[in-house]
Image (cartoon, rainbow, N blue to C red):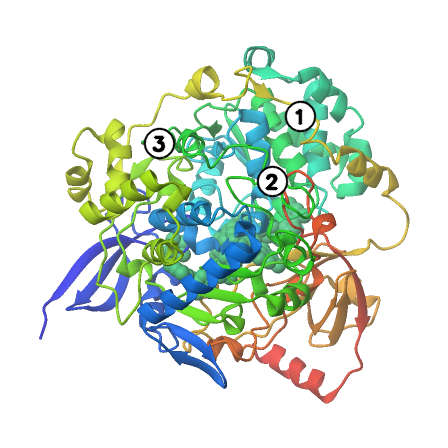
Amino acid sequence: MNAMETKPTYCRICEAACGLLADVEGSRVVRLRPDPKHVVSRGFVCAKGTRFAEIHHASDRVDHPLMRAPGGFTRVSWDRALEDIGRRLRDIRKTYGPHAIATYVGNPMAFSYAGTLASHALSKAIGSRNHFSAASLDCSNKFAVSRRMFGRAASHPVPDFERARFALLLGTNPMVSQSSFVHAPRIVERLKGIEKRGGSVYVVDPRRTETVKAVGTHVPIVPNTDAAFLLSLLHVIFTEGLQDDEALERHADGRVELERAVAPFSPERVASLTSIPPEQIRSIARGFAGAAASSCHLSTGVNQGRYGTIAYAAKIALELATGNLDRPGGALMVRGPFDLADLVRKIGVDDDDGTRSRIGGFAPLLGELPTSILPDEILTPGKDQIRALLVFAGNPLLSAPDEARLREAMKQLDLVVSVDLFLNDTGASADYVLPATDWLERHDYPLAQTQLQPQPYVQLSEAVVEPKHERRHDWQIMLDLAKAMKRPLWGRRWVDALIRAGIAAGGPRAFLLPLLIPALGLRPGQMLAEHPHGMRLHRERAGDFLAERIATASGRVQLFDPQVYGRLDALRHEMEASGGSGPRPLRLITKREKLGHNSWMHSNPKLSTKEQRAWIHPEDASRWNLETGDRVRLSSTSGSIELPVELSEELSPGAIAVSHGYGHVPDSGWVHAKGRGGVNVNILAGSGPHAIDELSGMCQFVGIELHLEPLAKTEASVDDRAHATAE
Ligand SMILES: Nc1nc2c(c(=O)[nH]1)N[C@H]1C(S)=C(S)[C@@H](COP(=O)(O)OP(=O)(O)OC[C@H]3O[C@@H](n4cnc5c(=O)[nH]c(N)nc54)[C@H](O)[C@@H]3O)O[C@H]1N2
Ligand SMILES: Nc1nc2c(c(=O)[nH]1)N[C@H]1C(S)=C(S)[C@@H](COP(=O)(O)OP(=O)(O)OC[C@H]3O[C@@H](n4cnc5c(=O)[nH]c(N)nc54)[C@H](O)[C@@H]3O)O[C@H]1N2
Ligand code: SF4
Ligand SMILES: [Mo]
């Protein structure tokens, strides 16, 4: 009988990175508990974090390499899998060139520093520009804007809610999600703190969300119109003379052009587009400019709309123009233990070397192309057509737009490899499925969080247990794949030799620890081992970003880049066309599930399977005499889905909310998730170069116009209704 040991670690499911304690008996993780000693989360966790022990042990995990064979997948050895994949990739590369091999990295890879770095080393080893990721489903508008405004795609303002007096939130529901681009557990608590200090919190959202019910003033908005609202705030600030002229003069170029751009967006004109009354727009603008410290945080609900690029640029302009950028209590430009934004440029990941995608001519952002063009890159004949796809920690078939077209494209590929914890929906049509370790089995450091922590800290977590079965680390698999292809990592022999020697000597941390030396002195490994619950860094003096770290050619923030504002005319036309009589057109919005994570984490027998619904306002429902449980068909220009409705006063009229991550394919390995039924809402989202933002390649999940058609009331819908009242 082994004694029980408790090991501190941290959760790597979402960006909050909450501290956990793992109770371990021998090699078995018995339980995960909140870590009250963690320097930032201080005992906060959500149910997904503590339930991860169940994911670690899940009976439907992929534990051995699997190869497609007639009649299903069959188990093969690692050697055989790597050898065969390597040979096939070499052949494809030789016949069709490097760009014929594509890689896709999903969201969980952002939580593995070694996996993130190795994915770039592998794509550069292949020499393919066709490197895709979940960023263009999530946040690439932010990368594109920061690159133009600050000169670095990875520099982002972080709201300092702990010290703020005014917070404006758009398109985020931290009560469920812990948000994004701010690595801070307990966000809702921090927001409540603002109100306790006498400050104000505004939450702009088409739905009265879980967050709104807990904190702040709800500002309902028509989906996809936030950019106009933010421009209107700037309009008020400039016309009422509320701006901080000194901040603008010292640190920004383009003020005149920006003022000209916002001129048409008066609160009166924006009101009918957004449904926000002009007086409220004015009072929010005045409150923001007048408070001692204010910040504006916008997230996926705005990123995934049609104007996410303008909205993010306007948000930054709002913060700068009111003197809140790089100010305590406002928007911090965190330095962190090292300058990650600068590092990614130095290693060549944030370059513009002129590379453009074959379809649509998109420039990569942080080395990654827009996922929405992947189907066309596969289906369009010609030189550099994609023939093979390697997927790491991703499920694009369910999480990316346009399942039908991506499915059609994937059928045409010569080779698909999925590296995952599970046989997911994408893996179900792969030739190989390779078993990855989970984060309880690997040491880690929150690299991606480095400059997004309002309270900077460092934490190095050792693996809690050894890898089970034949699971291998993602980084290890990536390095092995490059070797099997006989390609040097990063495309250079000396880099390959250096990386492999470093790994042999100390594992991936051989590359991490030197980065931490500036902040921690010469013995970072030892220091971090002494701080298993994390180690707080001193808060930097604010103001050093504006003074020293802006990386644009002029060393000043670029307030008005014409490409960033490329869709301004379209937005203005939408505004001018708004305000007709009759009901608003129906528009789709997103709705994240508390116990799921995008398309995964819900294949757990202990979770009750809730039926997927289309949430609709009773006023809209009354147009078709719909009652909760009635089935409808929702159609967009890309496709249609059928599901039951749920009437709810939470929605704004015109907004229809549908959760993603449903509609698992019958041959995926997610036994329980398949039982939840439902449909893939991303059938309604379009793919291809015209469906995405021209500058950032960001796709659209929000604000898609829908046509609703009631379906005949069948036996099934009567059952649905009974189910709904029982819930
Ligand atoms: N309609 C709609 N669609 C959306 C969104 C939305 O709000 N609405 N949100 C979008 C967002 S924000 C994102 S980030 C994307 C996500 O898009 P993806 O990242 O492509 O998809 P996920 O569903 O997160 O799938 C992650 C996969 O990684 C696997 N996995 C988990 N941990 C590991 C690991 O350590 N190693 C390996 N190898 N595999 C692992 C899981 O089993 C799962 O199969 O979805 C987007 N899709
Ligand atoms: N439980 C849970 N937590 C998660 C995830 C999950 O799937 N489940 N996913 C993780 C991932 S990958 C990410 S990126 C983060 C994302 O974290 P957030 O960005 O906070 O994402 P959501 O919780 O989807 O909140 C988006 C909000 O935008 C609103 N919205 C939709 N359309 C519009 C619009 O046009 N304008 C405005 N103003 N609001 C709009 C929606 O109603 C919703 O309340 O969450 C992470 N955390
Ligand atoms: S909030 Fe995020 S990081 Fe914290 S326990 Fe939940 S999933 Fe993990
Ligand atoms: Mo995400």
The answer to whether residue 67 is visible is yes
The numbered mark, 3 or 2, whose residue comes first in the sequence reads 2
Camera-near label (3 vs 1) is 1
Q: Nearer the viewer, residue 101 or 2?
A: 101
Residue matched to label 1: 561
In this rendering, the answer to whether 389 lies above or below 547 is: below
Q: Quadrant of the N terminus?
A: bottom left
Quarter holding residue 46? bottom left
Q: Quadrant of the C terminus?
A: bottom right
Q: Residue at x 37, y 51 (%)?
A: 115
Residue matched to label 2: 141
* SS at badge 3: loop
The disc placed on residue 243 is: none
Tell me residue 455's x, y (percent): 36, 35
In this rendering, the answer to whether 63 lies above or below 47 is: below
Tell me residue 563's x, y (percent): 69, 30
The numbered mark, 3 or 1, whose residue comes first in the sequence reads 3
* SS at badge 1: loop
Name the amino acid, label 3.
Gly
Tell me residue 459's x, y (percent): 27, 43
Q: CA distance from mark 3 to mark 1?
A: 28 Å
In the orientation shown, which residue stands out farthest toward the front? Answer: 95
Residue neighbourhood size for the residue with mark 1, other residues' Cα within 10 Å, grouped as few (<14), some (14–19), many (≥20):
some
Q: CA distance from mark 1 to mark 2?
A: 14 Å
